[in-house]
Image (cartoon, rainbow, N blue to C red):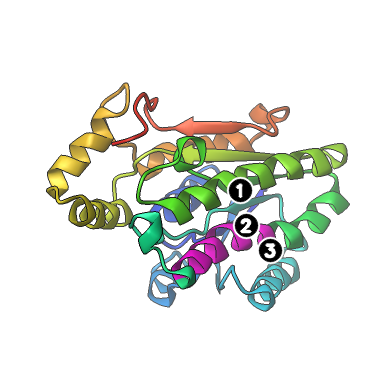
Amino acid sequence: MSRVLITAGASGIGRAMAEAFAASGARVWVADMDVAALDKCPDAWGRTVCDVSDEASVRALFGAVVAAWGGVDTVFLNAGIAGPTALIEDVALADWHRCLGVNLDGAFLCAKHAAPLLKAQKAGSLIVTSSTAGLYGYPNRAPYAAAKWAVIGLMKTLAMELGPFGVRANAICPGSVEGPRMEGVLQREAAAKGMTRDQVYQGYASGTAMGRFVTAKDIADMAVFLASDAARLVSGQVIAVDGFTVNPDP
């Protein structure tokens, strides 16, 4: 039975991934900062409070997983925050550091502690959540876009380093995902641009060939595929699940 660890797995995209992996028959472990959300997860799932930007917290997470399971097969580097919505000149350095600390440092630290486990068993999969912001950039989202570009470079390097050990690494780039997190982005961007929330929403939706937001389940389905044997030679790839972005500037 496959053993799957998902950071930021107690809600949103991470929760959808956890549910999809569990439905496929995998054992699931979720790490999250939100204690209340963790408490609402099924009892069958492993659960750990973890700050991915803190190495001691990440070390403790992997220690708990190894103690319970003896190893892990798939590690999903999913933790991230939206960061500030502002013109670059209005972004505070502390907000920049916070956004990169969770989105980029968090991915690095989890990969650092996952890699020896996966290399030792000569199999496994690392998947990182990037974003279409990591493909095109977005105005008013400089810290987030920078972090999401950076995790793609991290993933490609991991694919090279880990490939000789039978370990794959890939990135998923969600487009605009229905849910509370994107709702917050819409509200902040509307305020920054002097627009209504619905105008910003339509701008994002009309920027895709399919004219719609994606759902967390769409992302989860891709995650399950990338972790499966059906994708055994898929590595170093950046896969957008976004309805095909044709205008990245909403």
201 relative to 10, above or below: above
The mark lying in front, picked from 1 and 3, is 1
Quadrant of the image for the C terminus?
top left
Residue that badge 2 annotates: 107
Residue that badge 1 annotates: 151
Instruction: Name the residue located 53 percent from the left edge and 48 percent from the top edge.
Output: 148
- Report x, y in % for residue 168: 73, 39
> In the rendered structure, which amino acid carries the disc numbered 2?
Ala
**In the rendered structure, does residue 48 fall within the stretch colored magenta?**
no
Instruction: Name the residue located 32 percent from the left edge and 27 percent from the top edge.
Output: 208
5 relative to 225, above or below: below
Secondary structure under tag 3 reads helix
**In the rendered structure, does residue 107 fall within the stretch colored magenta?**
yes
Q: Which residues are magenta?
A: 95-110
Residue 22 visible within the image: no
Toward the viewer: 5 or 19?
Answer: 5
